[in-house]
Amino acid sequence: MSAITLRLPDDKHQRLKNMAEQRGISINQLLNEAATALLTDFDAEVRFRIRARRGMGKTERGIELLQKAMGD
């Protein structure tokens, strides 16, 4: 496991501390959960961009498949 130093304005630190207390977790756990959510979003975006690249130039085929799926 790694450790990092994060510099935050005092007001932001206090808000995070309050949020963590309300959730009954540590600031460390709160930031770990936030990092996990950000990485999940990033991974989804990367997968989407890879799939979009594979579909470049195949717009008509994609529309055909959508119409088939919709029963048209």
Image: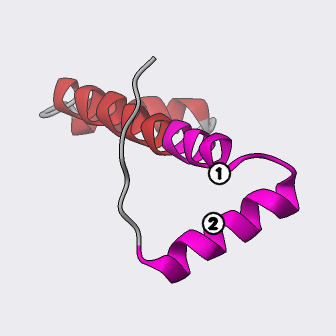
- Residue 25 against residue 23 in the figure, above or below: above
- At which x and y percent is residue 59? 24, 39
Q: In the depicted view, which residue is nearer to us: 42 or 59?
A: 42
- Mark 1–mark 2 contact, CB under 8 Å? yes
26 left or right, relative to 63: right
Residue 26 among magenta residues: yes
| Other-residue count near label 1 (Cα within 10 Å), few / some / many at <14 / 14–19 / ≥20 | some
At numbered mark 2, what does the secondary structure look like: helix, strand or loop? helix
The residue depicted at 57 percent of the width and 39 percent of the height is 32
- Amino acid type at circle 2 is Leu
User: What is the magenta segment's predominant secondary structure?
Assistant: helix
Toward the top, the furthest residue is 1
Q: Position of residue 31 (x, y in %)?
A: 56, 47
In terms of secondary structure, where does tag 1 sit? helix
Decide which of 56, 43 is in the foreground and name it.
Answer: 43
The x and y percentages for residue 71 are 63, 35
Q: Which residues are magenta?
A: 9-37
Residue at image coords 25%, 37%: 60
Residue 11 position within the rendered picture, expressed as x and y whole percent measured from the top left: 53, 82
Which mark, by number, is residue 27? Answer: 1
Q: Amino acid at mark 1?
A: Ile
Residue pointed to by mark 2: 16
Q: Is residue 53 magenta?
A: no
In space, the residues marked 1 and 2 are separated at their CA atoms by: 7 Å
Vertical comparison of 62 with 7: above or below:
above
Looking at the image, which is closer to me, 54 or 18?
18
48 versus 16 height, above or below: above
